[in-house]
Amino acid sequence: MTVTTAGTARPARSRARSTGALAVFRRALRSPAGLAGFVIAVVVVAAGLLAPWLSPMAPEATDYANPLSGPSGLHLLGTDELGRDQLSRVLYGINASVLVGLASVVLAALVGVPLGLVAGYFPKVDRVISQLVDVMLAFPNLILAVGLAAILGPSAMNAAIALAVGAVPGFVRLIRGEVLRLRGLDFVSSAIAAGNTHTRILWRHILPNATSTLLVQISVAIPHAILGEAMLSFLGLGIRPPTPSLGIMLAGAQQYIETAWWLAVFPGLAIVALTLAFNLFGDALRDALDPKGRRR
Amino acid sequence: MITAVLVRVARAVLTLFLAVIVVFLGIRMLPGDIAVAMLGQEGNPDNLAQIRAAYGLDDPIWVQFGHYLGQVVQGNLGRSSSTGLPVAEVIGRALPVTLELAVLAMIVAIVIGVLFGVAAATNQGRPADWAVSSTALFWLSVPSFWLGMMGILLLSIVWPILPASGFIPFFESPADNLRHLVMPAAVLGTGFAAIIMRQTRSSMLDALSGDYIRTAKAKGLSRSKVVFKHALRNSLIVVITVVGLQLGALISGAVITEQVFVIPGIGKLTIDAIFMRDYPMIQGVVIVVAGAYILINLLTDLLYTLVDPRIRLGGGAAS
């Protein structure tokens, strides 16, 4: 679904560029923006995953003496209406966002990649799969996720499933395109001529050559999923309270926006840091893979 | 050409038909049926049976579907199970609100996106390009509902110049209507402006490196003529596609923007219906949204052909 292709300035490069996943990854890290994105992503994700050790207080612990108090030495990011420490809740919220985001992307790839492989390789099956993908694309992504989340009921797992379903068509289309491109090439033709089974050709010859493209798609899908999770939770269709979630925190903050600005500001900044980091790195990956990148 | 258009239209209708099936089955996969949703798990069995009979829930599923499809084709989407009002009528009232929001947001997005995209492309590699490109990337990473909350915080509370929420119909008071929609439209539109900007920049860069641009420059045309009459015109094909594709995402964005600014459009209707477990309403809204989305995609496809005579429908569908 993503159609953006612009990239950062890149010096002219004359030698042939390897498109192996590792080479692309290294090249992405060489651009300042890509490196910055990677470092921020690692730091923020680590902060989230280490929440149980890093947070100063338990996320559910209430401090009734200090409800709705602003940032202070005691509570660095202030407290909410129940006096819960917001820094701790933001850290746990990042944790939840990252886990749901990654889970949904992994799920989407696990379903989308095999479907894409089959669709690109077997024209007859392609008709059915492509029509199914068209039907899925008939629902705007968020509407699909909202509808599914409503059917499945709100929970972190169901939010991941709902977001994954919306991301599957992207993977199917991408991998299908790669298969169509690759199967006309000589090495695939010779593998077919050598009598390899279809499964072996798809897994051993075609898929390994599509890994860099897949890597880019994953890097694009992660920030989407993180934003999606935040939206679902904001609407009350994602993670259930009292589990801390950035989206739920923001939904709650609406009520106190006139008096407690810190409740609205910090969870949002955490989401922005996460998505911006992944977007920066994803852009750098795409530039590193795109042969046109040389001209930009 | 005409057959190709008809094929596209037929495919769109087929997709819509399949979408209706998906929605119909999806709603029936919900835990508990409409009767339970209306009365609760402990509802009187007689009353439950009465509602099931009224909604035809005792019929086999294909009979129910045939009946439902017949009604949908006639424009009858059933009655809301929470208010009893006809679903089509309620949607008809909410749709113009969302459309106004979406159109205003799109205007914001296109104006900002194309202008800054051109500015970035013509200054490629200079600080201006860098500034515009990084702002766009930043904007893409900001959740629209948070942007809305920050807008309310800054423009309605810290420096109160705009209303924080609510909606006034245009025909009641155009000025008030716009005052209420300025912030939501800006919030919704700037996110898409970032996408359009990036696309405009990259297709402008492609266009500017074309031979015909060198020719135009060589024959002494002014810089602005080269940029706007030659390069931009050719870049617009891609931009139109992006705008078309983004209209669907714009509907999604409207759902959440309406929620933040308490605007009585389709988005708020959807979310409210979900929490009221108003299944006929959810069903109706999703079908209308999917239908609108399919129609928009179809029109984008067809518009594409009109703008670029090189593209002919039907051919090159391989990838």
Image (cartoon, coloured by chain):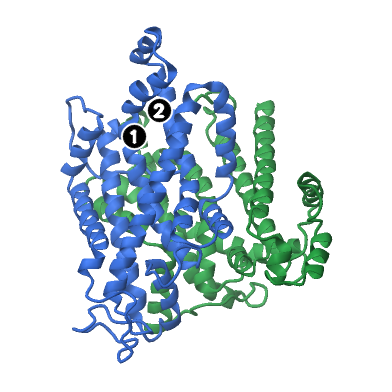
Which element type, helix, strand or loop, lies under badge 1? helix
Horizontally, is B174 left or right of A29 in the view? right
The crowd level at tag 2 (other Cα within 10 Å; few <14, some 14-19, many 20+) is many
Residue B98 place in picture, x, y as percent = 60, 63
Dot 1 or dot 2: first in sequence order is 2
> Could you tell me which residue is drawn at 54 percent across and 68 percent down?
B258
Q: Which mark is residue A129?
A: none
Residue that badge 2 annotates: A178
Residue B254 place in picture, x, y as percent = 53, 62
Number of marks drawn: 2
| Residue type beneath disc 2 | Glu
Q: Which chain is home to disc 2?
A: A
Chain with colour green in the figure:
B
> Could you tell me which residue is drawn at 60 percent across and 41 percent down?
A135
- The residue nearer to you, when weighing B255 against B131, is B255
Residue B31 place in picture, x, y as percent = 63, 59
| Residue type beneath disc 1 | Thr
- The residue nearer to you, when weighing A147 against B11, is A147
| Colour in which the image shows chain A | blue
Residue placed farthest to the bottom in the image? Answer: A65
